[in-house]
Amino acid sequence: SPRVQAFLHDYERSFGNPQQELYMAATYDALTLLVQAVEQHGYVPEKIRDYLYTIPSYDGLIGPHSFDMNGDVVGIPLVLWIINNGTVEVYTDSL
């Protein structure tokens, strides 16, 4: 998306070639959500937790997502990859 491309461009301009784009984007999203929670509710852990649990959806760099009542991410699918005979494949046996 254009937002992700702008994020990576700004990072590269400031710090050089990004190495772990997915982790950088996920960390950016997590920090952005945390800042929003603190700005709205202060440094009260229970209120921050409740804020995160009740956001309807956050359109982050890693895609739209929210959290369920256990704090697990909803909306970002888990995908496992394996290398099978030199070919990268989606591993579906455990999903």
Image (tube, helix red, strand yellow):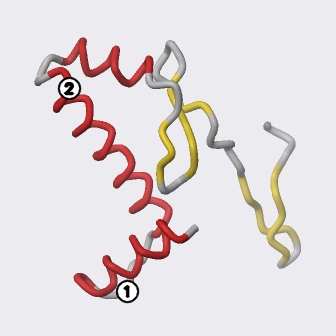
Q: Give left or right: position of 40 versus 27.
A: left
Quadrant occupied by the N terminus: bottom right
Residue 13: x and y in percent read 28, 87
Amino acid type of the residue that numbered disc 2 sits on in the rendered structure: Gln
Separation of residues labelled 1 and 2 (CA atoms) = 34 Å
* Residue drawn 34% across the image and 54% down it: 28
From the viewer's side, name the closer residue of 89 and 54: 54
Of the two numbered discs 1 and 2 on the same chain, state the one appearing first in sequence.
Answer: 1
* Residue drawn 53% across the image and 71% down it: 2
Q: Which mark is residue 40?
A: 2
Q: Give left or right: position of 48 versus 74.
A: left
Q: Which type of secondary structure does the marked residue at label 1 adopt? A: loop
* Residue drawn 39% across the image and 62% down it: 24
Residue 77 occupies quadrant: top right
Q: Which mark is residue 44?
A: none
Reply above or below: 65 against 18.
above
Q: Nearer the viewer, mark 1 or mark 2?
A: 2
From the viewer's side, name the closer residue of 38 and 87: 38
Quadrant occupied by the C terminus: top right
| Residue identified by numbered label 1 | 17
Residue 11: x and y in percent read 31, 77
* Residue drawn 20% across the image and 26% down it: 40
